Amino acid sequence: MKEHHHHEEKLVKISVNIEEDQLALLRELASEYTRRLGQRWSVSAMVRLAVGDFLARQGKMA
């Protein structure tokens, strides 16, 4: 059986402008994920998750 090792990517700090309602929803989702999964999720983590999903749907990431 092949072992899977979690590879942690280096994060790069950027600034992003988003709409107020998008930020509110990202905060809500971060709180929901934190409650559901038992570990802290930040807005930054939710943005990375959303960007990763978008890039995967565009065929740019596996």
Image (spheres, rainbow, N blue to C red):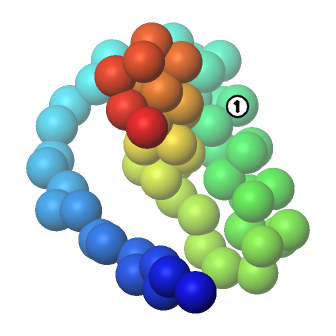
Q: Position of residue 22 (x, y in %)?
A: 60, 21
25 vs 58: above or below: below
- Residue 54 seen in the figure: no
Farthest residue, direction right: 36
Front-most of residues 26 and 6: 6
Q: Is residue 45 left or right of residue 30?
A: left
Q: Position of residue 16 (x, y in %)?
A: 28, 25
Residue 36 quadrant: bottom right
Farthest residue, direction front: 1
27 vs 37: above or below: above
Residue name at image x 48 percent, y 86 percent = 3
Residue 48 quadrant: top left
Quadrant for the C terminus, please. Answer: top left
- Residue 60 seen in the figure: yes
Q: Is residue 47 left or right of residue 28?
A: left
Residue name at image x 14 percent, y 50 percent = 12
| Callout 1 crowding tier (Cα within 10 Å): few <14, some 14–19, many ≥20 | few
Residue name at image x 45 percent, y 12 percent = 58
User: Circle 1 is placed at which residue position?
Assistant: 25
12 vs 9: above or below: above
8 vs 44: above or below: below
Determine whether the residue tagged by mark 1 lies in a helix, strand or loop: helix
Q: Position of residue 49 (x, y in %)?
A: 52, 42
Q: What count of labels does the image hold?
A: 1
Quadrant for the N terminus, please. Answer: bottom right
Q: Which amino acid is tagged 1?
A: Leu
Residue name at image x 24 percent, y 62 percent = 9
